[in-house]
C-alpha cells in the first residue's frame, strides 16, 4: 500500500503528431498536471504517409514541451499496450474532440484493456478552442498558403512554412512549377 502510493504515476500519450498542434499541446499540458510523469510517444504509423519524418516530429514535440519538466518525448515502437507496460505506465492518455472520435477510441481502449488490463485509458476532452483542430486540417491549410499561427506552436509553424516553401527557381523540375491546388 505504502509502496503503491509512493510510485510515480506515469502516463503515455501516443499519437502521430504529424504535426503537433495546439490541441495536442493542450492535452499534454493538462495530462502533465494530472500525472507525475508523461511520456509523449510518437508513432511511426506505417499506414499513414507522414509529412514529417519521425525524427522531425520528435524534435518538434521536444521543442514544444521544453517548458514541461515532467514530460518526455520518445518514439513509440511496436504495440502500444506493450510499450505502456514496458514504461511502467498506469494510463494511456487520449484526446477526444467530437463524437466522431469516440468509436475508434472506444475500440482501441477496449483492445488495449484486453492486452494490458492494468493500464487504463484516460480521455481528456478537447478544449473548445481546439475542437475542430486536427493535424490534417493544419497540413491542408499550410499547403495552400493559409495562416496556421493560431493553430500550431510557433516552431511548428516555422517548419510548415519551410516544408511548403515554393521551390527556388534552381530547384524546380519541369512540370512542378505550379503550386499545388487543393480542394479548400
Ligand atoms: P493518431 O493517429 O494516433 O490519432 P493524432 O496525432 O492524430 O494521432 O492524435 C493523437 C491524439 O491526440 C488522439 O487521441 C487525438 O484524438 C488527440 N487530438 C488530436 N487533435 C486534438 C485536439 N485538437 N484536441 C484534443 N485532442 C486532440
Image (cartoon, rainbow, N blue to C red):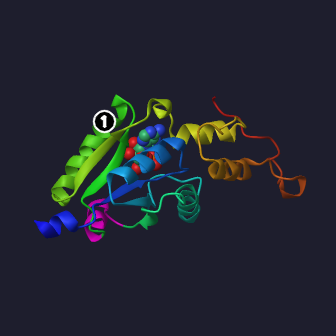
- Name the dominant secondary structure of the magenta segment: helix
**For residue 183, side relative to residue 95 (left or right):** right
Which image quarter is the C terminus in? top right
Q: Quadrant of residue 50?
A: bottom right
Would you call the spot at circle 1 few (<14 residues within 10 Å), some (14-19), or many (20 or more)?
few
Q: Position of residue 179 (x, y in %)?
A: 77, 40
Q: Which residue matches tag 1?
A: 102
Residue 108 visible? The answer is no
Which residue corresponds to the image point at 23% horizontal and 67% vertical from the top-left? Answer: 7
Q: Which of the 4 image quadrants contains residue 87? A: bottom left
In the displayed structure image, the side of residue 128 where residue 172 appears, left or right: right
Q: Is mark 1 within 8 Å of ligand 1?
A: no
Name the residue located 39 percent from the left edge and 53 percent from the top edge.
Answer: 32
Residues rendered magenta in the picture: 78-86
**Callout count:** 1
Q: Nearer the viewer, residue 106 or 128?
A: 128
Q: Quadrant of the N terminus?
A: bottom left
Answer whether residue 68 is visible to the viewer in this image.
yes
Element type at mark 1: helix
Q: Residue placed farthest to the right in the image?
A: 169
Amino acid at each position: 500500500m505504502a509502496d503503491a502510493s509512493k510510485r510515480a504515476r506515469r502516463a503515455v500519450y501516443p499519437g502521430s503528431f504529424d504535426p503537433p498542434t495546439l490541441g495536442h499541446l493542450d492535452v499534454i499540458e493538462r495530462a502533465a498536471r494530472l500525472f507525475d510523469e508523461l511520456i509523449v510517444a510518437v508513432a511511426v504509423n506505417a499506414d499513414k504517409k507522414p509529412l514529417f519524418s519521425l525524427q522531425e516530429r520528435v524534435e518538434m514535440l521536444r521543442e514544444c514541451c521544453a517548458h514541461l519538466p515532467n514530460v518526455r518525448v520518445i518514439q513509440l515502437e511496436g504495440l502500444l499496450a506493450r510499450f505502456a507496460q514496458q514504461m511502467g505506465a498506469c494510463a494511456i492518455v487520449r484526446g477526444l474532440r467530437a463524437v466522431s472520435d469516440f468509436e475508434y477510441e472506444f475500440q482501441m481502449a477496449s483492445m488495449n484493456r484486453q492486452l494490458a488490463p492494468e493500464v487504463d485509458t484516460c480521455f481528456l476532452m478537447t478544449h473548445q478552442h481546439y475542437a475542430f483542430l486536427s493535424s490534417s486540417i493544419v497540413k491542408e491549410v499550410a499547403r495552400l498558403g493559409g495562416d496556421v499561427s493560431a493553430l500550431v506552436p510557433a516552431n511548428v509553424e516555422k517548419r510548415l512554412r519551410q516544408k511548403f516553401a515554393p521551390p527556388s527557381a534552381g530547384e524546380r523540375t519541369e512540370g512542378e512549377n505550379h503550386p499545388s491546388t487543393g480542394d479548400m
